[in-house]
Every structure is written in structure tokens, then in C-alpha cells.
């Protein structure tokens, strides 16, 4: 009994092993197509691939064509298509309802259906063609009522005894199953019974496939799979040993429950079985289930009518609802939420033969095709570590957001409550674990066969996502968002460190985050950042850019993370390129001491965020990402290493006229039916009109599973000399091509960097009529004639011109002689006029000299009536800006000092006036005003400002007789009387005629203004105010008074803007504490800068007085 059990166990070992392998395979790369994507009926019946790589699908609406990018529908005379096959020449044969034929290109290269019903020479419908087999003996079209064979133009028919339930083809031999009759085989032109299959007469055989040299594999609807050994004699009858036996599989109930519907022997000797309600299954020749292809693996439907394998080892399924394909062989498979994983995956490791995965939702373990969650861990889980103590005992820990857990028998036991990122086993203290905590570094110690948490190391409180050790036993760790730290710890159990060093200045100005990692690689500390790779230079004692994996990681534009070194010395890392495109790579160690990057082997994995890589002892690697868990088996033949194909699908001109639609028609070996050629022949080369010399080429590579990552390069011979850069675009435009012969070349590059063959399309652009050689000759003749005519006409014209010029010269000579005499007479007259003009000029110069002398004398008189600066200096610190517009000015300023008398204090009277007019008239008015002020103040003793202005107004009116003459001349005046009332105290009395006074009191921050009355001195214009008013205010010694005429503020610059009162006050305020001379200089400089080259428009007078 023990031996029997042992034998059973031994026999079941391969099956159990198959289950184990299948359980950890995951989902192969796949893709689904719904009817609204391929624009056909939802039901599909057969799939084939032609020699160019194009996929064809039998659909209820016709034949679907797929080139890897686009679907198109080929009508089949409104018939439901049911079957397809491809012959040796690549021609696709079609079976439909009451229709049969083949696909071939039309004159424009578009694939179309060509019927062969005319070969049958019968009028009755043929029924539904359920199977087609293209063999070396001919093409077999199989219906329930008849089997037709077409070979060239010859036809042969076979009829059943009952009806043909289904036909099959094994090694070019046609077999058929007739209910109540049995299984028959065609030998020559005779159908004979296949002995040994009698027990299957009452069942339904849905597929027969070759197994080995003497046996065939039979798939029944509900009884599973059988092997039938068949030997036949030369007379055509079965003879010899015929043996039918069940074909045991690792999952026989699956086939009986889900009903086999079709099957296919794969190129590698495996079998793909399609079922009615369970999807498809891949078996090996021993019956071990290697792969399930159903809804759990991502398929959209599990009713599979037909199955096919393309040249890239993809399994295509013709479904009751849509079309799907899944990779048969791929080094990369995937686990995601369909298998129980939830959240963003962080870490992966194997412990006690069980695969564990952590995510932000907890920890999961793999069991029989699905991941299950470990109870008790609900927080964000980070690193899973498997450690081995000094006594050889292995233990698994997982660091989570609520503490560290120990994993054992698919359960979790909490060790401590400190939130942690990772658990790291010391290389120099085998029984010590360092824990990277959210706050500091924890320590665990192994004692008595168990691990115990000792506590945190004193003095370290940063967030520590990652830890490692160097060859000197120093502990390195990252401090989140801060720096890198090196710590020397000789006695970890004491929870104290010996020394500590921080590295703040990192290459690329990088800042450590949760994905920043440190690793001791060949004795050198490497640092990964989101901006590049760095290493610690012991000589310079700092981190420096590291180019060991390529210079791209030293530019600051390409980051690197993960950085795991597996047991096979493979280096795994994630590269981050802008804009945020992350890809996973592997680098293998070279015996010469450096790593070689394998840049393409993982290109089938989409860009994502990658977090961890674990490699099993058998070399299989597990990769965690934000999209799921990937399994990579480098021992699997990589389908991506197969050479892709590329086809030119369409050529269109600028007017959207299609020149080429993707295929070249040919006559194949049978010389009766067209087929599709792969190369263009001379007769296929189109001659394109010059008016259509702008072309668009569309091309594609039917390399299924990598469509989005295919790259293309192209060149137009006759127009370009070099191939283009690789691009993902599958179109190329050429505009305004010259006439001539061209050849468009295109090639493809797969994601695994395998280059395709070159596809070519030749064409010519016709020469336009205006470029014909005869036209060029005509151009030359016309040009020569035109030149000759121009030369002839020009010579004739010049001769006529010369004659006219000769006559003209004679005429003009006579005229010149006459005019010469006239000029002599006029010259004599001009000499006399010159003498008179010189005499008048001398007289004008004398008058002008006298006038200038008078004006200069007037200037001297005017300067004499102005107060002397030394007189003003006795009583004030002051500045005076006095600028006449002309030589003399209509402005003047006036001052008088009245000594104390009759118990009255001394007084100082100051006035500034702007008289009507400029130059000499203004100067006369200024002298009259100055004289009148002297009479009023000095002779009459009037000191009240308003009374002074009142008297001045009366006197000016009398002197100028303004009431009788309506003379408008007058002046604007600002006048102040200043009296010292006490020590350092002054009383100021002010009155103004259209002029104001500004004053500044020390200790304040503003310049105040006292406005005069709106009333003129003299003039016949109406006044707004009736009388002048005296304003009284107090000032202290050191306070300032400012007077100006409107010639300053009304001056414009080149932009027609005025100097303005605001600008004047701004200058005063900004310089108010400066000496008076400096204030005057500042005003003049600002005025000159503002005015520029513009002429002064009025007389200007500005006076500043600072009280002493």
C-alpha cells in the first residue's frame, strides 16, 4: 500500500508541479476588441494571419482586416462569413453562407473578395461553408451537405451518408465526422472509416489535431480529450492497431464542464483548446495546463468559436462577443486587482515558499492563483524583509505605519508600535536589526530564539525611510527632506551612537524623500535621487555625480530609484525622465567589473511608478508598481526578439485621391486565382501626375502587443539621402516633389530594439508639359528671337535718337549764344544792385549795433535796480534764479530794509513781480514797478502788504492812463513784510496779486502755501477779488520762504508736458534741509534736464529766503 501511494504521488508530481507553475504565472499581456471598435458584428467565427502579418477575421458582416492600428471591413456579397484559411502563397480563402472565394488586391491595391462559385457550375445554394482547409492537394470547402475541393480549375465533390457534422485536417489529410456513421478519412479521392473511433459515434467531435507520428488528438464536446492511434494499409482501408484512449490532463473536469469547440496545435508543440463557455486553455503534450485564457485573465467573453496563433506567438480568439488576443509566450506576466491585490504595491519578498506583497492597504500572500490579505494589518505597509539570525533561523518582518510585524504561516504578529519604513539586518552584528522609523532608528536583538525590540537610538529623531551599511560598519541612512547621515555604532544594543556626520550638500541640489535609497555596491555607497545617481567619494568626503550606469544620470534631468541588487548580482533600477516617465531596467554585472544595462528587455512593461524588485532562486523576478505586480522570467524565449514586419498601407495625394491601398496583386503558382504579392513589380509602379506631387504615406507594423511602442524610420530615395530619426508617427508627408523617379522606404523598430525588414513603394512624378525637352528648345528659340528683336529695335531707336540730338544741339547752340549776350547785360545790372545792397547792409548793421547797445544799457539799468545779493545776504540765507527769456526781463524782485523808528521794530519788505510782456517792454514795466515800490515803501512809509499793492495798482493805472487807453499792461506780485517780534521769532505779513508764497517750518514734513488774491496790478481786465488781503503768520529763525513766477512752472518739454507746481514743490521737499544755494542749484538742474532743447517760453524768477 505504501508503494502504491508512493507511485501515485510520483505520477501526480508533474501535475502538481504544473498547478504550482500555473498558479504563479499571472496574466499574460492581452487585448480586447469590441464590435464598436472594429465596426462589425459582435459575433466572429474564424481568424487567420497572412504572410504580411495582417489579421483577417470571419465576421457576420464580412471579413475584418486588422493591420495593428486600423480595422477595415471587406464585404462578401452580403453573406455571413464563417471560415478562413491561408494557403502557401499567403492567399486568404473565405467560406460564407452560400458563398466561397478568396481575398486578393484590386487594381488600386485594396483587398477585396473574389468568388469562385462559377467553378462549381451549379445553381442550387451550397449552404454554410463551416470549414476551409488549404492543403497541397487543393482547397477544401466543407459544408454539412458536401465537401468541395478546388485545385486550379478542377472541381471535386464528396457527399455524406448522413451529414458532415464537422471536418478536420491533419497533415493535409481531410477527416470528417458523420453522426451515426463515425469518423472518416480521405485517402486519395476515397473516404474510408477510421477504425478505433467507434465509441465516439454518438458523441460530437469538435477538433482533431496532430499529436505524433501515429496518433491524433481528438477533442469531443462533453467527454474530453482522446488519443487515437491510426495505421492504414495501402489499399485505403484501416488496418493494424487502432487504439482510442483518454488523454489525461491536469484538469479533465474543466473540458467536460465547458465543452470543447475548437483546437489548434501551436508551433512549439503545445495545444490551444477553445471552449464553449470557459474561454481557452493552453496544454503541453503531457496534458499539463500551462495557461488559462478567460475572464479572470482579462478576456471579455468566454465563448470561443475559433482560435489562432500569429507570428509573434499571440493566441487570437474569435469570440461570440468580440475579438481578443493573449500572449502565448512572454517573459512578463501581471497580477492586479483581478487577482485580489489592492492599493499601490510597495514591497515583495518570498518567505517559506510563499510570496508576500505589501501595499498601502496591508500585506497579501499568493495562494492558488489569487492573493489573499493577511488579517490584522490595515495600515500602509512598506518594506518586507527576510532576515537570518546567527543560528541560521529565517524570519520575515514587514514595516508598517503602525509598527513592525513578524510574518509566520501567512499570519502577522505585532512586534512594536513604532511606525516604520524598513527593517535592515546588520552585516556586522548578525543578531541586530536596524529599523528605519518615522522618528529615528529602532533596534531589535535576537536572543533565546526570538527577536526583541530594544528601543530607539538616542539623539536620532529624523524620519528614516532607508538604511544601509558600508564596509567599515558605519550605518548610513536617509533623513526625509533633509540630508544623508553616516553614524558609527559600535554597540547597537546600548542604543547610543559613537559619532554622526550629516551630508547636506548633495549633487543636483537633491533632497531625500521616501524613494531615496542608499546601497553598498562593491564597497562604494551609492545614492539614488529623483534627479540622478551619486556616490560617496571618500577622498573628497562628499557625494558626487555617478556615471557608472550612463551619463544621463548625471545631468540632473533623469532620476533613479529602487536600486536593488539581487542574488544573481543583477542591478534593478527605475529611471525617471521628464515629463515624469518612469521605466524599469535591469543591469547585469560584467566580469570586467562594471554593469551592462539591458535597456529593452522590460519595455513591454508600461511606464509606471516602480517600488521594489525581488528575485527568486530560480531567477524569476517580481516587480511591484502602482499598476500591479509584474513577474519577469528571463529564461522564457522573448517573443519581442522576433523580427517585426512593416507594411505600407496607403499612399494618398494632396487631393485625397488614393494612389495605393496596401497590397500588390499577383498571379500565383496555380495561374488561375490572384494572390497578394509582397514586393512591387515594374507594372505596379504608378506614374503620378505633376499636379498631384504632394503625397502622404501611411505605414504600420502588425507586431501585436507592442503597437504603441513601435518606432518607424523612413527615407525617400531620389529626394533624401539619409534615414529619418525613429518616431512613433506612422505617416509621412512630402509636398511639391519635383518630377522624377522615387522609392519610399520604411522600417520598424520593436520595443525590444529589433529592426524589421524594409518595405518599399516605387513611383514616379510625371514631367509637366512646361518641363518637356521640346518646350526647353522652344523657350530658347523664343528667348533668342526676343533678344534679337530687342537689339534690332534698340539699335534703330538709338539711330533716330542720334539724329534728333544732332538737330537739338545745333538749335541749343544758337539759343546759348543769344542768352550769353543777355547774361552779360544782366551781370552789369546785378553789379549795380550789389553795390546798393552792400550800402544798405552797412546801414542796417549800424542801426542793429545801436539797438543792441541800447538793450545792453537797459540790461545794465535793470540789473542796477535789482537788490544786490550782498544786501540780501545780510538778512537772509538765500538763492536767486533770475533768467530772462531775452536779454532783459519782464520779471523783477525788490527788497527794502526799514530801520527801527518811532518805537517800531525794523522791517524787511520783499517782493517778486511778473510784468506783462518780455524783453524791452517788460523791462520798462519792471523799472516802473520797482520805482513805484520804492516810492510807496521808502518815501511814503507804507509797510502793510495789501496797502502797498493797493497803492501800486492806483499809481500804475495813473501812469499808464489805463482808464482812457484801455491799456492791458500790468503785473502779478507776491509781497512780504517781515518783522522780528522776539528772539528768533518773526512775524510775516503777505499779500499777493495772482502770486503765492510758500513757506517751510523746521520740524514739519510739509511745505505750506498762502495764496494771493485773484486781482491784477494795473491792466484793464476784470478782477475776481475786489481788494488785496494781508495774511499774517509766524516763522522762526531758520524757517524758509519761497517765491516764483509762472515762467518756471509753465515751461514745457519735448513731450508738451509742463514743469508744474507739483514738480517744483517735490524738488523743494527733497532738498529742504540743504543750504539755500544747493536748493537753487537743484531747481536749476532739474529744470534744465526737463526742458532739454525746448526754447524758454517766459521770463523766470525763483527766490528762496531762509530767515536769520
Image (spheres, rainbow, N blue to C red):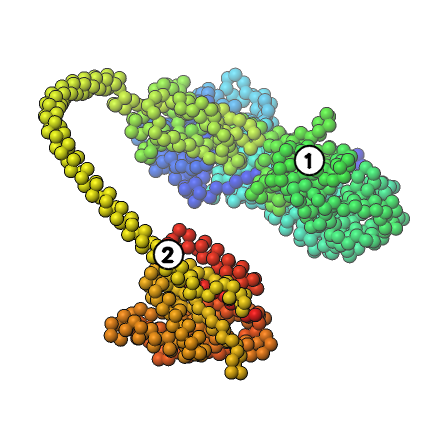
Taking 25 as reference, is 679 left or right? left
Relative to 220, say whether 342 is above or below: below
Q: Tell me where residue 768 appears, x and y as whole percent.
A: 27, 24
Callout 1 crowding tier (Cα within 10 Å): few <14, some 14–19, many ≥20: many
Between 737 and 185, which is closer to the camera in this rendering? 737
Between 1026 and 145, which is closer to the camera in this rendering? 1026
Taking 1076 as reference, is 548 left or right? right
Residue at 88 percent across and 51 percent down: it is 494
Residue at 52 percent across and 78 percent down: it is 900
Q: Tell me where residue 2 appears, x and y as whole percent.
A: 80, 37
Residue at 40 percent across and 74 percent down: it is 935
- Which of the two marks, 2 or 1, is nearer to us in this view? 2
> Which corner quadrant of the image does residue 929 belong to?
bottom left
Callout 2 crowding tier (Cα within 10 Å): few <14, some 14–19, many ≥20: some
Q: Tell me where residue 446 appears, x and y as whole percent.
A: 86, 47
Between 569 and 436, which is closer to the camera in this rendering? 436
Residue 856, numbered circle = 2
Res 596 visible:
yes
Between disc 2 and disc 1, whose residue precedes? 1
Residue at 23 percent across and 17 percent down: it is 780
Query: Which element carries disc 1, helix, strand or loop?
Result: loop
Query: Which element carries disc 2, helix, strand or loop?
Result: helix
Query: Are discs 2 and 1 less than 8 Å apart at CB?
Result: no
Q: Which residue is mark 1?
A: 546
Amino acid at each position: 500500500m505504501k508503494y502504491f501511494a508512493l507511485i501515485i504521488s510520483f505520477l501526480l508530481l508533474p501535475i502538481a508541479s504544473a498547478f504550482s507553475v500555473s498558479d504563479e504565472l499571472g496574466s499574460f499581456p492581452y487585448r480586447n476588441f469590441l464590435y464598436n471598435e472594429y465596426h462589425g458584428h459582435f459575433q466572429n467565427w474564424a481568424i487567420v494571419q497572412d504572410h504580411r502579418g495582417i489579421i483577417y477575421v470571419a465576421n457576420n458582416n464580412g471579413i475584418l482586416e486588422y493591420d495593428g492600428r486600423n480595422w477595415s471591413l471587406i464585404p462578401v456579397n452580403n453573406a455571413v462569413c464563417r471560415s478562413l484559411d491561408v494557403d502557401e502563397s499567403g492567399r486568404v480563402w473565405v467560406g460564407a453562407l452560400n458563398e466561397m472565394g478568396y481575398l486578393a488586391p484590386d487594381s488600386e491595391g485594396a483587398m477585396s473578395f473574389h468568388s469562385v462559385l462559377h467553378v462549381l457550375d451549379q445553381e442550387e445554394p451550397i449552404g454554410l461553408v463551416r470549414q476551409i482547409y488549404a492543403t497541397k492537394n487543393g482547397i477544401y470547402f466543407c459544408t454539412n451537405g458536401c465537401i468541395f475541393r478546388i485545385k486550379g480549375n478542377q472541381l471535386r465533390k464528396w457527399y455524406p451518408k448522413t451529414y458532415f457534422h464537422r471536418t478536420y485536417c491533419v497533415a493535409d489529410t481531410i477527416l470528417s465526422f458523420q453522426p451515426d456513421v463515425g469518423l472518416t478519412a480521405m485517402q486519395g479521392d476515397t473516404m474510408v472509416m477510421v477504425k478505433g473511433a467507434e465509441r465516439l459515434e454518438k458523441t460530437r467531435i469538435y477538433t482533431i489535431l496532430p499529436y505524433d507520428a501515429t496518433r491524433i488528438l481528438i477533442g469531443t464536446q462533453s467527454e474530453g480529450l482522446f488519443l487515437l492511434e491510426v495505421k492504414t494499409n495501402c489499399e485505403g482501408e484501416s488496418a493494424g492497431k487502432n487504439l482510442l484512449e483518454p488523454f489525461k490532463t491536469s484538469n479533465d473536469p474543466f473540458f467536460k464542464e465547458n465543452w470543447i469547440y475548437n483546437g489548434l496545435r501551436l508551433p512549439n508543440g503545445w495545444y490551444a483548446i477553445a471552449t464553449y463557455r470557459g474561454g481557452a486553455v493552453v496544454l503541453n503534450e503531457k496534458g499539463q495546463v500551462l495557461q488559462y485564457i478567460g475572464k479572470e485573465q482579462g478576456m471579455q467573453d468566454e465563448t470561443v468559436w475559433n482560435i489562432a496563433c500569429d507570428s509573434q506567438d499571440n493566441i487570437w480568439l474569435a469570440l461570440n462577443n468580440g475579438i481578443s488576443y493573449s500572449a502565448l509566450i512572454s517573459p512578463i506576466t501581471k497580477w492586479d486587482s483581478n487577482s485580489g491585490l489592492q492599493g499601490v504595491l510597495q514591497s515583495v519578498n518570498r518567505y517559506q515558499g510563499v510570496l508576500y506583497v505589501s501595499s498601502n492597504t496591508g500585506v497579501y500572500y499568493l495562494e492558488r492563483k489569487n492573493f489573499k490579505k493577511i488579517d490584522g494589518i490595515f495600515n500602509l505597509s512598506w518594506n518586507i524583509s527576510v532576515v537570518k539570525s546567527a543560528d541560521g533561523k529565517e524570519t520575515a518582518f514587514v514595516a508598517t505605519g503602525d509598527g513592525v510585524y513578524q510574518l509566520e504561516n501567512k499570519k502577522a504578529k505585532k512586534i512594536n508600535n513604532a511606525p516604520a519604513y524598513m527593517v535592515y539586518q546588520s552585516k556586522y552584528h548578525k543578531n541586530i536589526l536596524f529599523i528605519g522609523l518615522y522618528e529615528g532608528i529602532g533596534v531589535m536583538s535576537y536572543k533565546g530564539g526570538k527577536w526583541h525590540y530594544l528601543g530607539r537610538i538616542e539623539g536620532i529623531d529624523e524620519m528614516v525611510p532607508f538604511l544601509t551599511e558600508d564596509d567599515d560598519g558605519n550605518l548610513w541612512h536617509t533623513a526625509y527632506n533633509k540630508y544623508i547621515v553616516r553614524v558609527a555604532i559600535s554597540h547597537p544594543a546600548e542604543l547610543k551612537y559613537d559619532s554622526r556626520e550629516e551630508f547636506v550638500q548633495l549633487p543636483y541640489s537633491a533632497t531625500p524623500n521616501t524613494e531615496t535609497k542608499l546601497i553598498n555596491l562593491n564597497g562604494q555607497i551609492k545614492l539614488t535621487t529623483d534627479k540622478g545617481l551619486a556616490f560617496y567619494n571618500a577622498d573628497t568626503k562628499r557625494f558626487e555625480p555617478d556615471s557608472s550606469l550612463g551619463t544621463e544620470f548625471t545631468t540632473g534631468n533623469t532620476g533613479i530609484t529602487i536600486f536593488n541588487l539581487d542574488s544573481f548580482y543583477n542591478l534593478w533600477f527605475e529611471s525617471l525622465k521628464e515629463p515624469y516617465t518612469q521605466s524599469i531596467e535591469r543591469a547585469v554585472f560584467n566580469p570586467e567589473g562594471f554593469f551592462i544595462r539591458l535597456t529593452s528587455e522590460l519595455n513591454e512593461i508600461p511606464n509606471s511608478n516602480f517600488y521594489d524588485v525581488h528575485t527568486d532562486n530560480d531567477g524569476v523576478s517580481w516587480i511591484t508598481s502602482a499598476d500591479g505586480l509584474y513577474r519577469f522570467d528571463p529564461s522564457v524565449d522573448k517573443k519581442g526578439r522576433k523580427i517585426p514586419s512593416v507594411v505600407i498601407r496607403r499612399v494618398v495625394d494632396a487631393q485625397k485621391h488614393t494612389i495605393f491601398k496596401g497590397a500588390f496583386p499577383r498571379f500565383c503558382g496555380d495561374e488561375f486565382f490572384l494572390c497578394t504579392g509582397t514586393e512591387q513589380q515594374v507594372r505596379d509602379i504608378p506614374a503620378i501626375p505633376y499636379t498631384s506631387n504632394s503625397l502622404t504615406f501611411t505605414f504600420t507594423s502588425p507586431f501585436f502587443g507592442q503597437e504603441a511602442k513601435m518606432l518607424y524610420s523612413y527615407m525617400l530615395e531620389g529626394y533624401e539621402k539619409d534615414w529619418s530619426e525613429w518616431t512613433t508617427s506612422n505617416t509621412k508627408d512630402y509636398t511639391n516633389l519635383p518630377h522624377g523617379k522615387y522609392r519610399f522606404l520604411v522600417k520598424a523598430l520593436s520595443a525590444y530594439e529589433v529592426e524589421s525588414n524594409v518595405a518599399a513603394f516605387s513611383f514616379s512624378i510625371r514631367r509637366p508639359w512646361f518641363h518637356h525637352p521640346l518646350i526647353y528648345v522652344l523657350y530658347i528659340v523664343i528667348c533668342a528671337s526676343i533678344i534679337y528683336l530687342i537689339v534690332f529695335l534698340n539699335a534703330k531707336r538709338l539711330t533716330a535718337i542720334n539724329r534728333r540730338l544732332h538737330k537739338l544741339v545745333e538749335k541749343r547752340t544758337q539759343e546759348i549764344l543769344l542768352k550769353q549776350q543777355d547774361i552779360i547785360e544782366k551781370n552789369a545790372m546785378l553789379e549795380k544792385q550789389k553795390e546798393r545792397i552792400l550800402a544798405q547792409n552797412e546801414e542796417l548793421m549800424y542801426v542793429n549795433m545801436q539797438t543792441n547797445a541800447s538793450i545792453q544799457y537797459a540790461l545794465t539799468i535793470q540789473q542796477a535796480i535789482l537788490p544786490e545779493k550782498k544786501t540780501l545776504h545780510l538778512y537772509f540765507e538765500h538763492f536767486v534764479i533770475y533768467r530772462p527769456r531775452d536779454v532783459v526781463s519782464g520779471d523783477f524782485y525788490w527788497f527794502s530794509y526799514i530801520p527801527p523808528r518811532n518805537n517800531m521794530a525794523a522791517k524787511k519788505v520783499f517782493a517778486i513781480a511778473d510784468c506783462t510782456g518780455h524783453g524791452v517792454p517788460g523791462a520798462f514795466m519792471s523799472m516802473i514797478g520797482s520805482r513805484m515800490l520804492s516810492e510807496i515803501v521808502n518815501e511814503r512809509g507804507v509797510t502793510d502788504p495789501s496797502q502797498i499793492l493797493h497803492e501800486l495798482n492806483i499809481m500804475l493805472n495813473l501812469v499808464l492812463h489805463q482808464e482812457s487807453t484801455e491799456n492791458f499792461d500790468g503785473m502779478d506780485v507776491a509781497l512780504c513784510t517781515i518783522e522780528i517780534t522776539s528772539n528768533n521769532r518773526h512775524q510775516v505779513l503777505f499779500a499777493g496779486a495772482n502770486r503765492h508764497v510758500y513757506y517751510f517750518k523746521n520740524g514739519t514734513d510739509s511745505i505750506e502755501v498762502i495764496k494771493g488774491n485773484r486781482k491784477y496790478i494795473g491792466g484793464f481786465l476784470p478782477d475776481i477779488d475786489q481788494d488785496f488781503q494781508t495774511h499774517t503768520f509766524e516763522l522762526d529763525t531758520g524757517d524758509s520762504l519761497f517765491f516764483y513766477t509762472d515762467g518756471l512752472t509753465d515751461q514745457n518739454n519735448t513731450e508738451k508736458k509742463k514743469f508744474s507746481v507739483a514738480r517744483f514743490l517735490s524738488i523743494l521737499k527733497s532738498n529742504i534741509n540743504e543750504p539755500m544755494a544747493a536748493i537753487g542749484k537743484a531747481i536749476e538742474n532739474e529744470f534744465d534736464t526737463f526742458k532739454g532743447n525746448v526754447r524758454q517760453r517766459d521770463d523766470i524768477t525763483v527766490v528762496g529766503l531762509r530767515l536769520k
